[in-house]
Amino acid sequence: MDKVKVGMIGTGNISGIYFQNGGRFESMEIAACADLDVERAKVKAAEHGVRGCSVEQLLADPEIEMVINLTIPAAHAPVCIQALEAGKHVYVEKPLSVTREDAARMLDIARSKNLLVGCAPDTFLGAGIQTCIKLIEDGAIGTPIGATAFMMSGGTESWHPAPEFFYKTGGGPMFDMGPYYLTALIAMLGPISRVTGSARISYPERLITSEPLRGQRITVDVPTHVAGIIDFAAGPIGTILTSFDVKGGSVLPRIEVYGSEGTLVVPDPNMFGGEIRLSRAGSREWTDIALTHANAENARGIGAADMAKAIRTGRSYRAAGELAYHVLEAMHGFHDASEQGRHYAMRSTCAKPAPLPAGLADYELD
């Protein structure tokens, strides 16, 4: 199978793992990279043996069929729309867009041009979540009844070199980390019918203590502590808590799923592997569950490779734009519900992503 030639736009911190993994999949090849800072793109390109260029040059290149967009959230929609208008398929880092309106426009353009849109996170395609999906579908916990999800953090200003965007529109703990948790929950339990929640800005200003911006202050524009309730269309009820305001640490689990016959402890959805534990109804004992699927290590880029395979074969793909839009709408729904004091009824839905088969090797898709 001819590999899909991919151009990467955005050569910041996260680009390294995409370059590292890009050549490990049979379906795609990263052939070029671009950045608003063309010199930075050329330096990164030289490190990885690809062509560095401007965004305009990359989009004008007929060899490039697909763009991986690794820009900051505020640029996701403009860059994706530019790429789609240039006739390229696009795969973008999370979230799909800052606004629902821009995300919907992206999907409309893609449909009109018969192009594909995919979106991170793709950690749900790793060994951890895929093993949990198999356990649930095999009836290990009976009928799913509910779930809890917790992302408790003190914020990014203590470690990120440029943390300001985490506290601006498109940021905050829900928009930064919520996609990992919500995507994993949807992959296990299916789409969402409605949400409600409460959200607040606990600290209107944050002090940067990381380098190189130590001592600068950030004005916070988005909620930094968000508590939500999720009604899944299939019946389970979920609780999600995301926070950048936890200063003393937390011992809460990442995700638990509760069923009529047991409880499943799900690994960190920001990782590809992790420990899984199962407790059966009527027992106080916990059993450690072995991973049944591949890609327990950092396989970031597998969602893009899965989409590239779909470009070549016409089959469906898993980290799809419709899934990412559903996650984006739910995240906005928590904020809307808090502001308006009501439940937010979801207008979108999505297909539950097809599970990966057990028994594949790392970086295999079929």
Image (cartoon, rainbow, N blue to C red):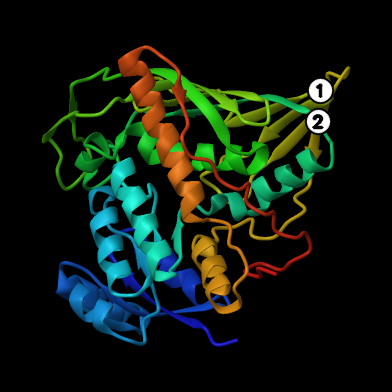
Residue kind at label 1, given as amino acid type: Ser
20 with respect to 276 (left or right): left
* Position above or below: 118 against 100: below
Q: Position of residue 248 (x, y in %)?
A: 40, 19
Q: What residue is rendered at 41% in x and 40% in y? A: 328
Q: Position of residue 179 (x, y in %)?
A: 46, 41
Given residues 354 and 105, the one toward you in this image is 105
Residue 44: quarter of image? bottom left
Q: Are marks 1 and 2 in contact (CB under 8 Å)?
A: yes
Residue 82: quarter of image? bottom left
- Upstream in sequence: badge 1 or badge 2: 2
Q: In this view of the protein, can residue 286 be seen by the observer? A: no
Residue kind at label 2, given as amino acid type: Ile
Q: What residue is rendered at 34% in x and 71% in y? A: 8
Q: Quadrant of the C terminus?
A: bottom right
Q: What residue is rendered at 64% in x and 45% in y? A: 274
* Position above or below: 235 against 300: above
238 with respect to 219 (left or right): right
- Mark 1 lies on a secondary structure that is loop
Q: In this view of the protein, can residue 345 be seen by the observer? A: yes
Which residue is identified by label 1?
260
Which residue is identified by label 2?
141
- Mark 2 lies on a secondary structure that is loop
Q: Quadrant of the N terminus?
A: bottom right
